[in-house]
Image (cartoon, coloured by chain):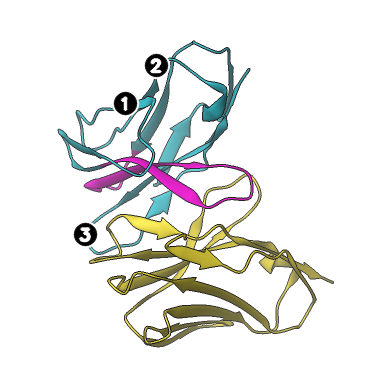
Chain colours: A cyan, B yellow
């Protein structure tokens, strides 16, 4: 099925470990986004990209890095995991003047 | 103060009820207004979006935007148990493809 695919679905990390959350879309969308959603809260924008090779910070970028080498992929990297980064992470994509399509999320716990 | 405030809920209604979900916002530059539905352990899915003020209807769902009051609403008629989910309002400045600011969500339960 066409859409936004996120892997892994669940992950437990130890404090200080690093990992990459993967996001890929097959709709040829230029815009891609990473959000985090804490329990009972809305979505907060971490990073976004308007096209391959172009990324920019969102509302809560500290502790994260991104890259966009292709139109399809937009991985999110955590370098030194901290308990405050326990959250559900959503990737989204959109084309010009279209609403955002979301993946089903990665549930990340840092202990 | 948050840019977007959403009625916190939770909201529990009997099947068939009319549901009203509401958000207020402080930034008059917002032009695009969206409502997303999020089922448990799933990503948000777009229900409706509107540009500027006015009403938009899609089946049992009606979205209203009042820019003069900085207030938006989503109405669900003849609510069904399958409507049980968290509803998120979202707003953006210059296109609905742009960065969006989300409300914290209202969890709705429709009881059979």
Examine the rendered structure and indicate whether residue B74 appears above or below residue A77: below
Quickly name the residue at label 2.
Answer: A79
Residue at (58% x, 47% y) in the render = B42
A27 magenta-colored: yes
Kindly check if marks 2 and 1 are in contact, taking CB atoms under 8 A apart as contact.
yes
Residue A65's mark? 1
Q: Can residue A21 be seen in this view?
A: yes
- Left or right, A46 with reference to B77: left
Tell me where residue A95 appears, x and y as whole percent.
25, 55
| Mark found first going from the N terminus, 3 or 1 | 1
Name the foreground residue: A5 vs A84. Answer: A84
Q: Mark 3 lies on which chain?
A: A
Q: Which of marks 2 and 3 is in front?
A: 2
Q: In which quarter of the image is residue A55?
A: top left
Query: The C terminus of chain B appears in which quarter of the rendering?
Result: bottom right
In the figure, B72 relative to B10: above or below?
A: below
Residue A79 quadrant? top left
The residue range painted magenta reads: A25-48
Q: Residue furthest left?
A: A53
Dot 3 falls on a residue whose secondary structure is loop
Alpha carbon of mark 2 to alpha carbon of mark 3: how far?
Answer: 32 Å
Q: Which chain carries label 1?
A: A
Q: Earlier in the sequence, mark 2 or mark 1?
A: 1
User: Can the viewer see residue A28 in this picture?
Assistant: no
Reading the image, the residue beneath label 3 is A96
Report whether A107 appears left or right of B71. Answer: right
Q: Which chain carries label 2?
A: A
Q: Position of residue A92 (x, y in %)?
A: 38, 46
Disc 1 element: strand
**Picture layout, residue B3 above or below residue A59:** below
């Amino acid at each position: 099925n066409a859409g936004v695919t996120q892997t892994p679905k669940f992950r437990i990390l130890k404090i200080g470990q690093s990992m990459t959350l993967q996001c890929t879309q097959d709709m040829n969308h230029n815009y891609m986004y990473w959000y985090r959603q804490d329990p009972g809260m809305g979505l907060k924008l971490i990073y976004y990209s308007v096209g391959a090779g172009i990324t920019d910070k969102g509302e809560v970028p500290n502790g994260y890095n991104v890259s966009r080498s292709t139109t399809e992929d937009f991985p999110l990297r955590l370098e030194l995991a901290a308990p405050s980064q326990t959250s559900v992470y959503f990737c989204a994509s959109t084309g010009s003047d279209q609403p955002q399509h979301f993946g089903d999320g990665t549930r990340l716990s840092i202990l | 103060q948050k840019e977007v405030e959403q009625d916190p809920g939770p909201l529990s209604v009997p099947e068939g009820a009319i549901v009203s979900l509401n958000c207020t916002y402080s930034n008059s530059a917002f032009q695009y207004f969206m409502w997303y539905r999020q089922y448990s352990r799933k990503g948000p899915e777009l229900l409706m979006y509107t540009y500027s003020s006015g009403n938009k209807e899609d089946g049992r769902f009606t979205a209203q935007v009042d820019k003069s009051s900085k207030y938006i609403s989503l109405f669900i008629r003849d609510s069904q148990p399958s409507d049980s989910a968290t509803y998120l309002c979202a707003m953006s400045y210059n296109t609905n493809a742009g960065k969006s600011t989300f409300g914290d969500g209202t969890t709705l339960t429709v009881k059979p």
